Amino acid sequence: MSDPLLIPDNGPSSRDGRPATLPSWLLSMIVHAAGLLILAMTVGPSPPSGAAGERTGEVGIVLKRHQGKRNLYTGEKAQDKAESAAAASAAQSAGPSSLAALLGDPVPVDAGPALPSRQAIGRGPRPGGGVVGVDNATEGTGGNRGTPDGPGVATGVFGTKASGSKFVYVFDRSGSMEGSGRSPLAAVKAHLLASLNDLETVHQFHIIFYNENPLPFRPGGRDGSLIFATEQNKKLAHQFIRGVRAAGGTKHEAALEMAMALHPDVIFFLTDAGDPLSSDQLAKIRKRANGIVIVAIEFGYGPQQNQNSFLRRLADQNGGQYAYVNVKEL
């Protein structure tokens, strides 16, 4: 007996020679199934907009017929299987590069330029200075005081040398510095200008001449502060130095306090040693300096007499050089 669901292909004609027709009950079933399909497609929920790639349910008619021991399927289900197989094959052949393109691989980012460059923090070892005086040379005993806070340079006056990036020059301009013959103050000015020429624009400096009171360099009327060694600032410093005159008495401590307040790497301190600093004052300066190198230059007339002057102790206690200059030999 033939399967009632089988739709014959180009089967044989009926006995009377007319083409075979489907039974009425089978036609009714097909009509009802088509009506249900149309109803499901009309009433069923629509997928949300933008939801790409979602699978949705489908309703279809599948007809089966026997061919030997195998079941053969025809209709929409077979088509769906064929489309799925084709999609899987295409995805497999696409490979990882297509997946990476689909996901949008991020571009590698080099974080190196965003990181700060490596810099020394605080003060590290700084070479201590030995005294290279014009008339007498000894080594300072204050030890190492750290590296400059920036690109360093070595400079000095009257044979002394110190390295740093921030320098303050504190020079005596009392009446005794006028001297006789060639003025000691004139020699001081010449050495100071030569030291400034060693500095580049990345270095900073300040100048303080003093007698009873400090006379700081104030370019443009600004408060006394460290300034960069630009050509313009050097010209202004040259004008200031030329206008300094020797007069009055000597008070060292106030000028040194002003210099230390600027927190330089090096202080060049020069005087003819009148009105010496006491041991208590030296101890106070050492505490206040807190690592600032102080180079001391002593002016005197004739060979050095006092081998333990307060200036030598000032340099020794603050890691700097000490030099004695015989003014008669200038």
Image (tube, rainbow, N blue to C red):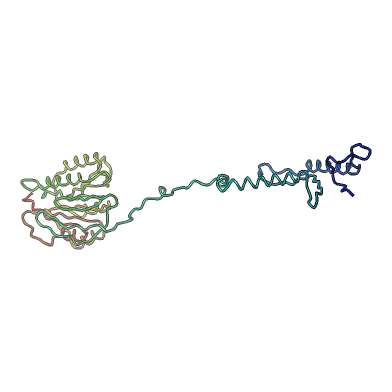
Indicate left or right for 35 with 307 as reference: right
Q: Percent position (x, y) of residue 303? A: 6, 57
Tell whether 30 sits left or right of 179.
Answer: right
Any part of residue 92 in sight: yes
Residue 250 location in percent, x, y?
Answer: 15, 52
> Front-most of 66 and 301?
66
Residue 302 sits in which quadrant? bottom left
The residue that appears at 22% across and 54% down in the rendered structure is 256
Q: Residue 219's quadrant in the figure?
A: top left
Q: How many marks?
A: 0
Question: Up-down: is 164 above or below 139?
Answer: above
In this rendered view, identify the residue nearer to me: 146 or 259.
Answer: 146
Q: Residue furthest right?
A: 16
Q: Position of residue 38 (x, y in %)?
A: 81, 40
Specify whether residue 273 is in view.
no
Q: Residue at x 29, y 50 (%)?
A: 150
Q: Position of residue 287 (x, y in %)?
A: 26, 60
Q: Nearer the viewer, residue 233 or 76?
A: 76
